[in-house]
Image (cartoon, rainbow, N blue to C red):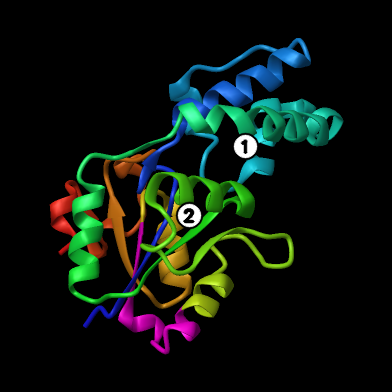
Amino acid sequence: MIRGILFDLDGTLVDSLPGIASALNLALQDHGLSTFTHEEITEFIGNGAQVLAEKALGDRKDELGPQLLKGFQTHYDEEWKTGTTIYPGIIELLDQCREAKLPIGVLSNKPHPFTQAIIHKLFGTSIFDPVEGHQDEFPKKPDPTTAHRIIATWRLTPEEVAYVGDSTVDLATAQNGNMVPAIVSWGYGTPENWPLLESTTALSDFLDLP
């Protein structure tokens, strides 16, 4: 039985691509570099801001990686505010989780301050507990360390928790942590490339989760 739910953020709860793409392209322009389409940038999302910057730079990541990352974060501090929206139906889904008295939390590879700022602005402070983005002292997904820290505070076992996300990183996080994977099709992942999808709960609509 599922007794708790952890959610990914980007591509699962919110469409953050417009803000990410705008901030990344502004940072690239600051260095006189070519920009990318939104579709191309979806391929960079899922492993955190540093990997985002490295993928955008390609062979120049060692030369410009830290500078581009800093520029992206500076621009994203403004761009996420107008470039992030909640997916349709998510509020209703979260209401159902709360009515079922399930603890629900957020675990993202997005830097922790941005993760918390987005959740608090769009959802308030009373729905998710806890809200965890990437912090340098803990490994990123698909390592399940932070997921297990959260689950321990809920006094549950990993097998009692579903991890809901949109990417192969999220699928691997659930599998590495012995959680129940639930992969959504409305985010940035590409379903035809999901490994082991046959044995994974795939959600094409928010109403599929209950």
Q: Position of residue 12 (x, y in %)?
A: 35, 48
From the image, which quarter does the N terminus lie in?
bottom left
Say if 188 sits above or below 132 in the image: above
Q: Secondary structure at mark 1?
A: helix
How crowded pointer 1 is (Cα within 10 Å; few <14, some 14-19, many 20+) is rated as many
* Mark 1 and mark 2 residues within 8 Å of each other at the beta carbon: no
Q: Position of residue 132 (x, y in %)?
A: 54, 62
Q: Position of residue 47 (x, y in %)?
A: 57, 48
Residue highlighted by disc 2: 169
Q: Which image quadrant is residue 161 in?
A: bottom left
Q: Residue at x 42, y 83 (%)?
A: 154
From the image, which quarter does the C terminus lie in?
bottom left
Q: Secondary structure at mark 2?
A: helix
Q: Residue at x 39, y 63 (%)?
A: 126
- Magenta extent: 151-164
Residue highlighted by disc 1: 52
